[in-house]
Amino acid sequence: MKTSETLTKADLSLVLREQLDLDKKAADLVVEVFLQCIVDALHRDEGVELRGFGSFKLRNCPVRQGRNPITGEALEVSAKRVAYFKPGKDLRNQLLDDPPEAIFQGRNPPAGRTEG
């Protein structure tokens, strides 16, 4: 696993390959299908709840007045839908407790992460 400050889809695929003894193609497919399920649910205006981890939902942002940061000119920012993630209680507690990252099992975790 590369060392960076971001866990990537490739990193997730690598963990699946190692933990579940999958080949690269199968692990990549699992990651893609999982993420696409979340996107599809949000497109249907459904939330996604992963108990203990968190939930993904869409928020409607109304039209608002903004400013051009260069000229200072007022402009209208159009309405949009924005996806957001709300961490679950278990995830919040784990982040506060800073437990060891067992999933990396002796490998170097991504930069910015610590093991035990």
Image (cartoon, helix red, strand yellow):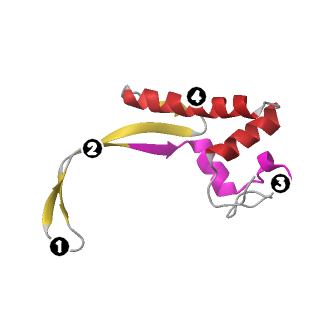
Q: Nearer the viewer, residue 48 or 23?
A: 23
Q: Which residue is mark 3?
A: 107
| 3D distance between C-alphas at marks 3 and 4 | 26 Å
Please tell me whether residue 1 is drawn above or below residue 74 in the rendered image: above
Please tell me whether residue 33 is drawn above or below residue 88 in the rendered image: above
Please tell me whether residue 72 is drawn above or below residue 3 in the rendered image: below
Q: Which residue is mark 4?
A: 33
Q: Name the element at disc 2.
A: strand
Tell me which corner region of the image, top left, top right, bottom left or bottom right, holds residue 84.
top left
Mark 1 burial class by Cα count in 10 Å: few <14, some 14-19, many 20+: few
Mark 4 burial class by Cα count in 10 Å: few <14, some 14-19, many 20+: few
- Magenta stretch: includes residue 6: no
Residue drawn 18% across the image and 48% down it: 63
| 3D distance between C-alphas at marks 4 and 2 | 26 Å
First reached walking from the N terminus: tag 3 or tag 1: 1
First reached walking from the N terminus: tag 3 or tag 4: 4
First reached walking from the N terminus: tag 4 or tag 2: 4
Stretch in magenta? 83-106
- Find residue 30 and report its horizontal and vertical position in percent: 65, 29
Q: Which residue is mark 2?
A: 80
Q: Residue furthest front?
A: 25
| 3D distance between C-alphas at marks 4 and 1 | 44 Å
Q: Nearer the viewer, mark 4 or mark 2?
A: 4
Rendered-image quadrant of the C terminus: bottom right
- Find residue 36 and report its horizontal and vertical position in percent: 52, 30
| 3D distance between C-alphas at marks 3 and 1 | 49 Å
First reached walking from the N terminus: tag 4 or tag 1: 4
Residue type indicated by callout 2: Lys
Q: Which residue is mark 1?
A: 72
Say if mark 4 contacts mark 2, CB within 8 Å.
no
Q: Residue furthest bottom?
A: 71
